[in-house]
Image (cartoon, rainbow, N blue to C red):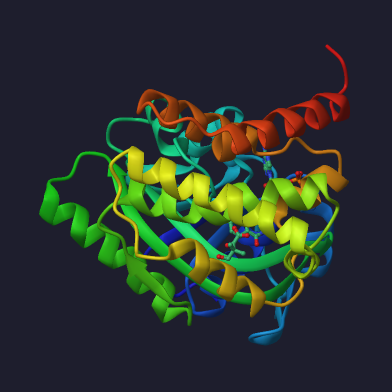
Amino acid sequence: MASGHSRIGIIGTGAIGGFYGLMLARAGQDVHFLLRSEYAAVTARGLRVESQVHGALQLDSVQAYRQAADMPPCDWLFVAAKTTSNAALAPAIVQAAAPGAKVVLLQNGLGVEDALRPLLRDDMHLLGGLCAICAHRAEPGVVVHQALGAVNLGYHTGPADAEQRQRIVDEGVALFRAAGIDSTGMPSLAQARWMKLIWNAAFNGLSVLLDADTRTLLRNDDSRELVRLVMQEVEGAAQACGYTLPPAITEKMLQGTAAMPDYLPSMYHDRRAHRPMELEAIYAVPLAQAAQAGYAMPRTEVLYRALCFLDAAAQPPG
Ligand SMILES: NC(=O)C1=CN([C@@H]2O[C@H](COP(=O)(O)OP(=O)(O)OC[C@H]3O[C@@H](n4cnc5c(N)ncnc54)[C@H](OP(=O)(O)O)[C@@H]3O)[C@@H](O)[C@H]2O)C=CC1
Ligand SMILES: CC(C)(CO)C(=O)C(=O)O
């Protein structure tokens, strides 16, 4: 039912877009979903989230679109496609944006806002949203939500002074909280992106290379050591780039992961489906930023090169 004050657009309705879009719609927000391969399934059967946290959730009547040109102008746009699609999706994001729209990249990795910013209009605000969640697509229109769910928001760039930026972040946080989702504003988006990267750089790539979920990676002494070594290297890189991190962050993340259910990161699903992997945002940009700061990341670079090999072999030539 559309009774919210802001109009919300979901750009890319997969695991993240499907989950958060459905939660916002159930809370009474006016949510419009841009879809591609799952458009027919979602218009026929609605969106379903099989959540191990909230139970089985169903949105029967989905405001679904194949093209951004058909969407009404949206005040908030949550971009939940993979980062590999951002440049191609930029015209759609601009088309769906109301004047002064807030665009939030619900994506992993570094540098994603920097890359998209020049492709947006000057009146648009750009934010990052870091999702701490375990979710994947099970079949068209069906998302499995295994654990967690928080979204933390940070302002990147746009036509706002410090006070207005804070107000926008608070408004976004309030949207999620009203939908039953934990959310907090982040004073430094770049610091928060580096911190999350400690987890993603290690587990995403190693899950692909070793064909293993998080529990399997942590159970074996050798793979657990590999995970730890990559995490420590990314932690060191973040510090070399000038970001202060909480003490013992790698150990805390390892403990947190051991308490999670068996989880296959989204890069694992991309590899299995022969989709491009998010190698630029999760590896290439951090390696470049660390190199700029004079910090070498040899373990992460080995991981990155091996993943590039697999990625190239998975893509059609040309
Ligand atoms: N899954 C998770 O638990 C977590 C994911 N993340 C991050 O969130 C982001 C999204 O990941 P996730 O939800 O797993 O990804 P998914 O692959 O599940 O979803 C991406 C969606 O974007 C759609 N899409 C891509 N291009 C277009 C286009 N041109 N037009 C319309 N739709 C398009 C895809 O459609 P199609 O089916 O046609 O390809 C798909 O539905 C990533 O950056 C990921 O790293 C962060 C934390 C946890
Ligand atoms: C790290 C994790 C599992 C939870 O914070 C996640 O959000 C991700 O897969 O990117």
Q: Is residue 13 visible?
A: no
Left or right side of 235 for 86:
right
Residue 246 vertical position relative to residue 279 in the rendered view, above or below: below
Q: Quadrant of residue 276?
A: top right
Report the residue at 47% width, 37% height from top.
112
Q: Residue at x 61, y 28 (%)?
A: 88
**In-front residue for pair 62/129:** 129
Rendering quarter of residue 169: bottom left
* Residue 7 visible in the displayed image: yes
Q: Quadrant of the N terminus?
A: bottom right
**185 shown above or below 154:** below
In the rendering, at what x and y percent does residue 93 appear?
50, 38
Judged from this view, the residue extending furthest toward the top is: 318
How many numbered dots are placed on residues in this image? 0
**Position of residue 14 measured from the top left corner of the image (x, y, whole percent):** 70, 55
- When asked about the image quadrant of residue 266, the answer is bottom right
| Residue, far bottom | 55
The quarter in which the C terminus is drawn is top right
Question: Taking 300 as reference, is 213 left or right?
Answer: right
Residue at 42%, 38% (x, y): give it: 113
Q: Please indicate whether residue 112 sits to the left or right of residue 10 in the image.
A: left
* Residue 54 drawn at (x, y percent): 64, 86
Q: Is residue 224 above or below residue 189?
A: below
Q: Is residue 132 left or right of residue 157?
A: right
Q: Give the residue drawn at x 79%, y 63%.
A: 213
Q: Could you say where residue 194 lies in the image, as x and y percent from the top left?
A: 43, 48
Front-lying residue, 118 or 102: 118
Closer to us: 248 or 292: 248
